[in-house]
Amino acid sequence: MKISSQEEYGLRCLLQIARVSGRGAGAGEERWERGPVPISEIAVREGLSVEYVGKILMKLRKAGLVESTRGKAGGYLLSLSPSSISLRRVLDALSDPMYEPDYCRRFRGTEEACVHQADCGIRSVWVMVNRFLAETLERVSLADLVRGEAGAAARLLESMREQVDRMAREDPEALASSS
């Protein structure tokens, strides 16, 4: 899996807004220390152009993750608490999914359908990897990232353990039929 620059910088922009505005800065509390964060401030803090940050924030606004306010004291705020914003939701707002149901149709060669349609070992790998990744990203929130590397790593490990335990109990044939 490759993380695009837009995905990376989109997460960084959201982290800047969460940290600077102070939304959800306390343990479960909602508060605003400072108010909206201007695009120019985010751009300077991340070493990006104002135009690029604006483009990213427009996508995040359309996805309902940030709100914008105009005027002298304008800028961007999170629309939700950091604990309510999953990494999956952010990445979905900024890019296409890694694996889509029509994936096999895109790799059929010169045939009408993939020659491995009936029994494909590759498809089951992509389905499992996509599922594992999607569930992991759903369980890690912006709040986990705001806590720093240790907080994010702890949440990620906890999520991975839960998923591996659950997957170990599942019937592998059920996964193959989900494609």
Image (cartoon, rainbow, N blue to C red):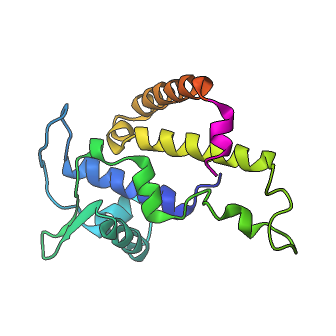
Q: Classify 71 as above or below 17.
A: below
The tally of labels here is 0
Inspect this view and state whether residue 78 appears. Answer: yes
What range is drawn magenta here? 171-179
Residue 120: image location, x then y, percent: 80, 49
Q: Is residue 149 left or right of residue 106?
A: left
Residue 100's image quarter?
bottom right
Q: Classify 134 as above or below 67.
A: above
Tell me the residue at 12%/74% (across/down): 72
Residue 128: image location, x then y, percent: 64, 42
Inspect this view and state whether residue 47 appears. Answer: no
Q: Is residue 6 left or right of residue 64?
A: right
Of the pair 13 and 137, the residue shown nearer to us: 137
Q: Is residue 100 left or right of residue 60?
A: right
Q: Classify 25 as above or below 162.
A: below
Residue 1: image location, x then y, percent: 65, 51
Q: In this view, does 152 lie to the left or right of 83?
A: right
Residue 168, magenta (yes or no): no
Residue 178, magenta (yes or no): yes
Tell me the residue at 73%/62% (across/down): 104
Residue 50: image location, x then y, percent: 38, 73
